[in-house]
Structure formats: C-alpha cells, structure tokens
Amino acid sequence: MIPDQKIAVIGAGIMGSSIAYSLTVRLPRAEVLLLDSQPGTFGATAYSPGIIRRHHTLTADARLSGESLAVYRHWGEVVGGDCGYRPVGFLMLADRSQETAVRLNSDAAAPWGMLPEWLEADDLRLRFPELAVRDDDIAVLETDGGYGSPTLATASWQAGFRSRGGRHQVGVLVGGLDEHAAGWGVRTNIGVLDADAVVIANGVGAAPLLATVGLDVPVTPRRIGLAHIRLPRTRGAGLRTPSCIDDVTGTYFAPRDNGLLAVGVRARPECDPALQVVPLGSDEIDEARSRGAQRVRGLAAAATVGSQVAGDGYTPDTRPILGPADPALPGLYVAAGFSGGGFKIAPAVGEHVSAVIAEEPVPEQIQPYRLGRFSDGEPLTGENPYAYM
C-alpha cells in the first residue's frame, strides 16, 4: 500500500477503533477515517460483560486472547488512558467428565500468560466460598484474567487515533459501497467518500453493507444481554469474585466495580439491526438469575437492579471473519461476526488486520478466520469442545 493512501474504517465500536488506531501506528502517513452513525460508544461494545480470558476450545482463539491480554495488562504503556482491566481472575468451571478437555484447553492457553492453576472441588470451596460447588466440579483459574471496560478501551483507542491525525466522523450513515478504478466509493448521508481501502467493522450492519458489493456474508444479528444483580456479600475484605464461564450450568458472569454481578442472558436470534433492540423481558432475566443462582450463593434472593441488551453479529461457527473480503475485491477488508466475544481479542485483531491492510503477509494468527471457510465447508470448531462453550 502507498503510505499516504486513504483508508475508511466503517464502525467505531471496539473493533473499528482498535483497527483505526493500529493503522495510524503502522501507516503514519495514511489518511484514516473512522466513520459511525452514532456518537460515543454504543451497540455491542457498550453492553459487553468485558470478560478477559485466554481459555478457549480453539487454540487460535486462545492465541488471539493471549496476545490481547498482554496489551490489557500494560494498557497505559502501550495505548494510554484506561481500559478498566481488573485482574480478579478468570475461572473455567466444568464437570469431572470434561477433565481431559479442560486440561488440554488449559495447556493450549498457557503459553500466552500466567500458568493456569488447576482446582479440584475442595480447592474451589476454599478459594471461592461464595460459589456452590459439587463434588464433581473441576476448574482452571487464570489469575491474570478478569474483566475490563470495552467502553473505556474504545475511548482510549479513539483518543490515540485522533492524536495521531486520524479523522473520527460521527453522524455518518453508510448505505453502500461502489468499486471503481481508483478504489472505493463509500455512499453515505453526507455524500460519497472516496477511499483506497475500506474496512467493514460495523457489527450487525456488516452483512447488509457487504451485500451491496455482491458478497453473501453469514453474519446474523442476535440479541444478547446481561442482568445486573447485587452481588451477595460473602467474601472477606479485599477479595473479589472472579469472572467465570460455568459449563455445568451453562452460564457466565463477571463482577463490576460497583458491587454488581453481570450475569449473561442467552443469545436469541430476534434482532433486527435496523430497529431498536427490545429490552430484556422478565422471563429472560429470571432465567439468567436462575442459572447464576445455581453457582453463586445468595443470588436467588439478591436484588436485580437493571439489565442491558444489544445486538451483535453471529457467524455459524461463532468465530469472527477477519481479513480480505474477497480476492476479486482488492482493498476491501472485514472484521465482523465476533459472536459476543470481541472484547477479549480486540487488541490482537487491530494489530493483525492493520497488517493486512498495509499489504503485509496475512498474519498466521488470523488466517483461520478467513471468510472463505464457510463457502469451502470448513467452519472452525474447537479441538476440545464443552457442552455449552
């Protein structure tokens, strides 16, 4: 890529902001535009639980998460500002029948952070008295895991992007793309913006936008949410409940700085990206509370103080699409379909997608996430899957 070309990044959520920031670092002479229809942070970025972990069932996912965790741990030095990183630990809970898978996945995540700690049922009871533990429960604890703030991280990236000369334009609604001899035309409500390269990172809006250039991208909008419940006071002073994925009960949760516990509500394919996402119903909140109460003592009687819901783009294999959109469409790139799991890999995604845009070889870290895997019948599957994860 010519160093002073113009690059348009569509979508100023955590992914678009990470990519735009990384582009200004990698290509300081390029003109980078970060476009979004809304000011501030909204959509899936604003409503993420912010769990930070390395543990995955797919080694490629663990690698991206591990690389990103290193950035979150040293955020002030690497990016500047604050990402809200809280190393309260990440706990992966499973049934004894899943021991082989848990150990293998833990080993796969080990190279990119602190050594995971194996916990038996008695260890869990001692370390986490607020959790209801069965005799057949096992777990691994990543002490460098925990949670962070996608909103703060996005704001930091955007501030760094602007300080490096990037142009952040809001109130820009993108309606389509046109390929022409000199690059791309981005059709918007403020006119056509010309660019040498375009990055589609606008979440649930990615598939409709890519359809304007004839690409059928399997990203389906799903409605996902969190129930905010007052965390029962069962721990001693200075001790924190960890972020957790519980494969036994099929739930996940993460603490908050304000003493609340964010409990996941199961994703449902009921979201029209063109409309406001419907708030969570009492049945959904009750279901989330019920699952969480199977693991967190006192949660059934604790006060629910609120909820949040957003739409996010899901792919058939629940892994993102990263890299060039299509060989026949040079200069068009995709970072979409994060399926509710984008925050924990955002720093690595920004780094590696910006490398592709700079016409460096496609980094091996994102090669598995190519769009063509779906048409080739090669969706990504975890090497060591669990019941829910």
Image (spheres, rainbow, N blue to C red):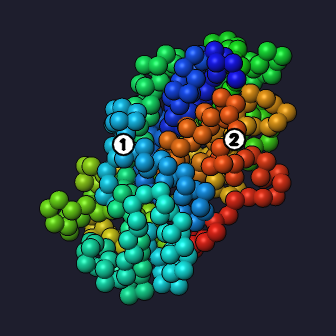
Residue 301 locus on image (x, y percent): 28, 68
Amino acid type of the residue tagged 2 in the rendering? Val
Tell me the element at label 2. Answer: loop
Query: For the residue carrying disc 2, how many other residues have a C-alpha within 10 Å: few (<14), some (14-19), or many (20+)?
Result: some
Amino acid type of the residue tagged 1 in the rendering? His
User: Which of 178 and 118 lies nearest the eye of the viewer?
Assistant: 118
Label 1 sits on residue: 74
Query: For the residue carrying disc 1, how many other residues have a C-alpha within 10 Å: few (<14), some (14-19), or many (20+)?
Result: some
Q: Quadrant of the C terminus?
A: bottom right
Give the residue drawn at x 34%, y 32%: 81
Kindly check if marks 2 and 1 are in contact, taking CB atoms under 8 A apart as contact.
no
Q: Is residue 131 visible?
A: yes
Label 2 sits on residue: 362
User: Which of 74 and 261 lies nearest the eye of the viewer?
Assistant: 74
Q: Looking at the image, is 335 positioned above or below residue 301?
A: above
Would residue 371 be found to the left or right of residue 302 on screen? right
User: Which of 223 and 251 lies nearest the eye of the viewer?
Assistant: 251
Would residue 353 be found to the left or right of residue 217 on screen? left
Residue 26 locus on image (x, y percent): 56, 27
Would residue 272 be found to the left or right of residue 130 on screen? right
Give the residue drawn at x 32%, y 77%: 124
Residue 48 locus on image (x, y percent): 45, 47
